[in-house]
Amino acid sequence: MFTTKLPSFKNTNILLAGDVMLDRYWTGPAARISPEAPVPVVKVDGMEERPGGAGNVALNLAMLGSSVKLLGVTGKDEAASLLGSKLKAAGVQCEFLEQENQPTIVKLRVLSQHQQLLRLDFENPIKLDELIITQKFTAMLKGTDVCVLSDYGKGVLSYPQTFIQAARANDIPVIIDPKGTDFERYRHATLLTPNLTEFEAIVGHCADEKTLISRGQLLREKLSLEALLITRGEHGMTLLCADQPELHIPTQAREVYDVTGAGDTVIATLAAAIASGQSLQQATILANIAAGIVVGKVGTATITLPELHKNVALRQSKKKRGVVTQEQLLILLEEARSQGERIVFTNGCFDLLNEESVNYLEQAKQHGHRLIVAVNSDESVTNIKGAGRPLNNVNSRMHVLAGLHAVDWVISFDEATPVALIDKIRPDVLIKGGNYTLEEVTGNDLVKSYGGKVITAELVT
């Protein structure tokens, strides 16, 4: 239905307004209990500061390659200076309205062995002149592709309609990460991205998919939204648009360490993708992949463009089980090995695929979890077999092999031997037909040098 591709975010321009804050992390071992109270004692041996709230959204956008302008409110203090310096170092253009007697919001987390033990919040409700911040926001709209409103309920977006109307008057899409139980404030936004808890706080508990979809569409229509994206944790995401069937995308996460900041990554990826010309559906698929990356990290985290590129390629590779490129295969191998899977490699012309060949491949697969079949290119087959061969071109040979149950991935090689490919793949098992001795198997010494196994099996005709 939808293909995944990674667009260029280089020329995208995002205007972001919202609640900025500084996230502090104190980490260390907790090996004993305090004699003063039944609480763990953490010996702090590491301290780190990261942009939080809308600052984390801005950092995610910058890491993806977007040009970002950030409008927020801070105090006149050390935390504001630190926050601004970290964001500017990442290329974010910061416009902070500094308030007298208003401390910059700081959240301090104490962690031990990747587990959060305590969080301390330093903040006061933000009070500011709505007219001043609206004028500032409107002045920053020029050249903007997409506006993002990151609402953490701290006061900057107490009256979001002024921001929405200003952006929509300039035909600029508005994406909002909402807060609270009054979604009427976000009427006429392009896209709203509540999590399931926030969504059900508005529409009530949804016992099944049908209820969630029907109530979501009613809410979308009521608020005059172009789309509603409900993020559902381990159940993935559901995108609801006008005049289109719902799009449900399962979660991409394999292991969840910390969901802190995952919503920031989602909305940043959505904004960058939409600004680059992607449809809402394509943008949502990319945002789901990005969320799967970031929840595998500890604390308020960002994704990088290489990480997103790798995971998009991995998704494409999984869709193309069978014939793969070398880049896709190497990514798949990393994934397989992370699951403890044993890799088997064989190669050949496979021009005359018969029952004996099929039996050989089934036997080869029994030596591991994944079987890679490397196929000689047409030119190399001619060099080996002589004029008139191959009878079937390389694409035909590869796709026939890919259809076999025993075969996981098929790849071609142009060289006279697959030694260079074997060196990149480094299989656990190298197998060839029984018409070879072990010493004659190409790549024998290489595979044995790193502890791999080389075996021979039934003859391949």
Image (cartoon, grey):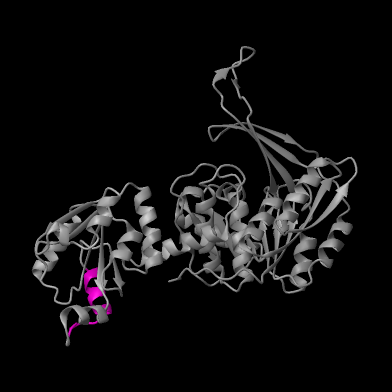
Q: Inspect this view and state whether residue 62 appears.
A: yes
Task: Name the residue nearer the viewer: 420 or 83.
Answer: 420
Task: Give, as a single range, the part of the protein colored magenta.
Answer: 389-403
Report the number of discs. 0
Q: Nearer the viewer, residue 437 or 365?
A: 437
**Image spot of residue 273 (x, y percent):** 59, 67
Task: State the image coordinates of residue 227 (x, y, percent, origin top left).
Answer: 59, 65
Residue 73 falls left or right of residue 148? right
Task: Identify the residue at the far top of this view.
Answer: 35
Farthest residue in the right direction? 100
Is residue 392 rendered to the left or right of residue 435? Answer: right
From the top left corner, tell me how far across and down residue 24 is, in percent. 69, 38
Q: Which residue is drawn at 17% across and 77% down?
A: 351
Dominant secondary structure, magenta: helix
Residue 211 % position (x, y): 49, 55
Work out which quarter of the rendered image holds the C terminus and state it: bottom left
Q: In the picture, residue 32 is in which quadrant?
A: top right
Q: Above or below — where is 393 with respect to 362?
A: below
- The image quadrant that residue 28 belongs to is top right
Q: Does the magenta stretch include residue 134?
A: no
Q: Is residue 401 magenta?
A: yes
Residue at image point 78% right, 48% down: 155
